[in-house]
Image (spheres, rainbow, N blue to C red):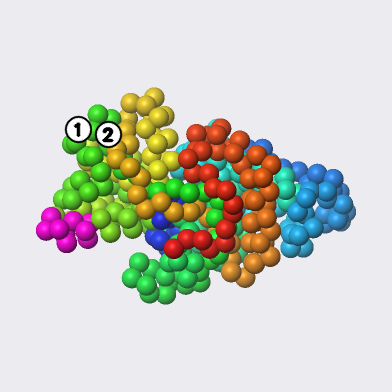
Amino acid sequence: MTARTTRRTPAKHRIAAAGTIAVAGTMLLTACGDQTNSGSTKTGGETTSRNSAPLFAKLPEKYQKSGVIKVGTNAEYAPMESVENGKIVGVDPDLAEALGKQLGVRFTFTSGSFDGLITALNTGRHDIAMSSITDNKQRQEGLDEKGNKLGKGVDFVDYFLAGTAVYTKKGNPEGIMSIEDLCGRTTAVQRGTTYEATLKKQSKACEAAGKKAVDIESFENDTEAQTRVKSGGAVAGVNDYPVALDLSRKSGGGKDFEVVGEQVDAGPFGIAVSKDNTALRDVLKEAVDAIIADGSYKKVLDKWGAGTGAIDKAAINGGK
């Protein structure tokens, strides 16, 4: 959850509001290219300190011993994260692989509902959440859209930049040219995302201008929102810009959707980390900076056609 304010972002920009995660509905999948603990051995189930990865020594002991960082995600946002042949693939899993080489550990991904990711993180189900989550103050502080306290907030390590985009059925039969054209129109979106928040903000702007509010249809997952647009039940959908662009290129062989107008409300995607886990947060920032410096970061983004979201340096809680 763009926005994955993704953004699945306070609600690409794809974090999630606190909520109960449906454990029965999750699926455990391991990202492609799992890393091994290069240079390390295990004795009695514990990894020894011989790991030669550059940042291994800075990891909290918990991860040095386990050799694993557990990642919560919502694998419905190609090219950022999606499921292919039973594996989670995309920008985020590949970046996690590159980070793992710096840290000397393996990242394992579990896919669940987007709006439950932060709750699952803060209850210890995951060590981090990496799912196109827009870093913003609302998520940092654990607030709802009205500023009410929902629960514990999280810290972010910012690693990508994206905004909200509008997409329509191929051919744009309703002539939607920008988000401002959605006043009074039915628009589909995934619930709990920052791009849902952007759409609500636009709806208020419509009313302030004397126009009808946007008829917002919010769905549990993004696939349902896409189906609604494809069927003509909604004139448009909103999503993180890289996700919407990928949809326009690949869905139905490029014949299902098209992106209209410019992306709006651009902001950082962040790796979410518990506020109690500052040591992990800080070494993850170092790892992001390291893969930017060695070129592996750019290589991953170029592979997935996501180079427009590249940043020059990682940040902690850089979202507004």
Mark 1 closeness class: few <14, some 14–19, many ≥20 residues within 10 Å: few
**Image location of residue 91, percent across then percent down:** 55, 41
34 up-or-down from 124: above or below: above
On the image, the x and y values in percent for residue 241 come to 40, 43
At 45% from the left edge and 66% from the top edge, which residue is drawn?
137
**Residue 163 visible in rendering:** yes
| Residue type indicated by callout 2 | Lys
Location of residue 294 in the rendering, given as x and y in whole percent from the top left corner: 69, 42
Q: Which residue is mark 2?
A: 169
Q: Is residue 274 magenta?
A: no
* Residue in the picture at 15% in, 58% down: 209
The answer to whether one can see residue 186 in this image is no
State whether the magenta stretch is mostly helix, strand or loop.
Answer: helix
Query: Dot 1 corresponds to which residue?
Result: 173
Nearest the eye: 184 or 210: 210
- Whether residue 206 appears in magenta in the rendering, the answer is yes
Secondary structure of the residue carrying tag 2 is: strand
Q: Residues within 10 Å of mark 2 (few under 14, many from 20)?
A: many
Horizontal side of residue 29 vs 267, given as left or right:
right
